[in-house]
Amino acid sequence: MTINVWRVFRRHLNVLKKTWLNNLMFNFIEPFLYLLAMGFGLGNLVQEVDGISYLQFIGLGMIASSAMWAATFEATYGSFVRLHYQKTYHAMLATPATVADIVLGDLLFAALKSLIFGTVILFVVTAIGLVHSVWALLIFPFMLIHGFFFATVALTFTSWCKHIDYFNYYITLFSTPLFLFSGIFFPLNTLPAWAQWLAWLNPLFHSVEVVRSLGLGRLEPFLLVHVIILIALSILLAWLPIRMMEKRLIQ
Amino acid sequence: MTSIIKAKNLYKRYGDFTAVNGIDFCIDEGECFGFLGPNGAGKSTTMRMLYGLSRVDAGELTILGEKISLTPPAIKAQLGIVPQEDNLDPDLTVMENLLAHARFYGIPSSEAEAKSKELLEFMGLDVKSDDDVESLSGGLKRRLVIARALINEPKIVILDEPTTGLDPAARHLVWQKLRQLKERGISLLLTTHYMEEASQLCDRLVIINQGKILAEGSPDWLVQTLIPPEVIQVNLPSTSLPTGLVERVKELKAHPVILPEMTFLFTPAGDQLWEQLSSLGLNPRSCIHRPSNLEDVYLTLTGGNLGQ
Ligand SMILES: Nc1ncnc2c1ncn2[C@@H]1O[C@H](COP(=O)(O)OP(=O)(O)OP(=O)(O)O)[C@@H](O)[C@H]1O
Ligand SMILES: [Mg+2]
């Protein structure tokens, strides 16, 4: 790992500066649709969850999911296009940059996208009065950790993936279930005990817990466990896309 | 002369398939060295081993005095790479492509900008500076890839088919630029399918087929040494040749080389052989008499069926 990680990141940043309008606007629509349909629509039927309004309940959760989707799309489709179609990685490898530099640069960039997407939702839910604590400021640095983790998982899949269509499977069979059973739309303590234990295997569940608690100012030491799990998993897993990308790029 | 690249018994295997099958070569500083060979011969594979996209499986590879199995960043910093497949960054403009590349060599941005301008001018791309890469024609893209390969003032430039797909004028322009690089003392390594390119640019070259080197030398030396000076090219498929042609040609002290679509009759005395054409059963209209050249050497070595 060298200064070249930063240089890879800079290249992505350059591109983002030119394309942010196309790139970002469209992707914001989806979380708003969810907020609208679920929060206002379903919210009329559901009175209160965990002592807060349903809109508030899912609004805070959507910060985490929106950030997860951002990192996921960047590290799947975004990275794959650079890897497979544009051969951007090959071009970088002709310079002193290494595969590890490229992979970590991509992960950092995906983490940044998480931060950007999470931030927009955070601003919106704050604007409509759903955030009740200055602890919500900690959501910013947390988004980076959260984004880095989901990018690592996604990039691992990407480094194995031979065809762009396979990402449909990743999204439908992996990301979507995580999204639906993360405690964003309903509190997991309504589920049977075994399902609650299963939720612990869902990384998004940990993020949702952290983000929602910070937004409500309901701090407890136990939140650190969720954060530590994500950090530990990131560190444990980050070598995997590096190794797999090396195998793929260096023949 | 010091050698900057030295390969000894180099191998590259993909599963059961041996793409590079024990080749040796040695490239001197300031030299232009060529790799000629048919599709799938192993040229690009060899290039990739040199510039760090492939690991050396067996044998010894020394670049700039360092023995390597996978070219490390410090060596890559001294190389300029023109890959067979263009890999410009379509998300960036022409200028930005050079600047983004320059960053990886730690070139300060003001210096990178000056250098990029100079290179765009050198390659005749200065008016395109702010254009999208996607809007460039194939030839201009190729020139930009070459410009990009020069951003770090490399000691060695490796060019994998630098002029494939270029029109003749563009090809001559690239040759001119490559000659200028050579004059500056930069060593060039290139693969090509164009014999004229090899003859014009290369000090020495190897002809490679199925991962093995078949011949090595300067273009002139190869032509003068490996084949007689004149050739009568018979433009007939091997199946429509008159029977007994081979034996009778040999009696006339010529060397027949039969390729699927044509036959070469190499000879030191073309005029005399030409007069015998009708007696050999050949129609002079389907024959051409000319001095032999590098392409004849190439075709003879890689596809020739030496008179059997
Ligand atoms: N990653 C790979 N996996 C398996 N086989 C490969 C791989 N890369 C190359 N090969 C095989 O190795 C052989 C040599 O390929 P190479 O690209 O070096 O040929 P080349 O001489 O550059 O040909 P061309 O003139 O068509 O560019 C080919 O048969 C090719 O199919
Ligand atoms: Mg090739």
Image: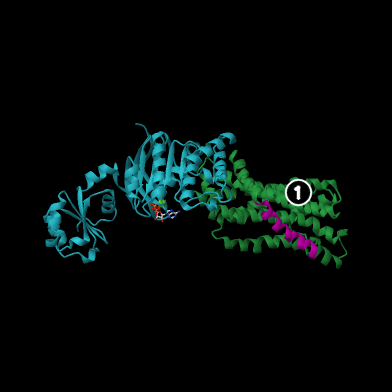
Q: Residue furthest bottom?
A: A45
Q: Position of residue B149 (x, y in %)?
A: 48, 42
Quarter of the displayed picture in which ligand 1 can be seen: bottom left
Query: Quick check: is A26 in the magenta stretch?
Result: yes
B79 left or right, relative to A199: left
Q: Which residue is mark 1?
A: A225
Q: Position of residue B206 (x, y in %)?
A: 32, 45
Q: Is residue A2 above or below residue A16?
A: above
Q: Which residues are magenta?
A: A19-37
Q: Residues within 10 Å of mark 1 (few under 14, many from 20)?
A: few
Camera-nearest residue between A222 and B260: B260
Q: Position of residue B24 (x, y in %)?
A: 34, 42
A60 left or right, relative to A170: right
Q: Chain of mark 1?
A: A
**Residue found 20% across the figure and 47% down from its top:** B229
Question: What amino acid is labelled 1 in the image?
Answer: Val
Query: Quick check: is A164 in the magenta stretch?
Result: no
Quadrant of the snapshot with the N terminus of chain A: top right
Q: Position of residue B100 (x, y in %)?
A: 57, 42
Q: Main secondary structure of the magenta part?
A: helix
- Is disc 1 placed on a helix, strand or loop? helix
Chain B color in figure? cyan
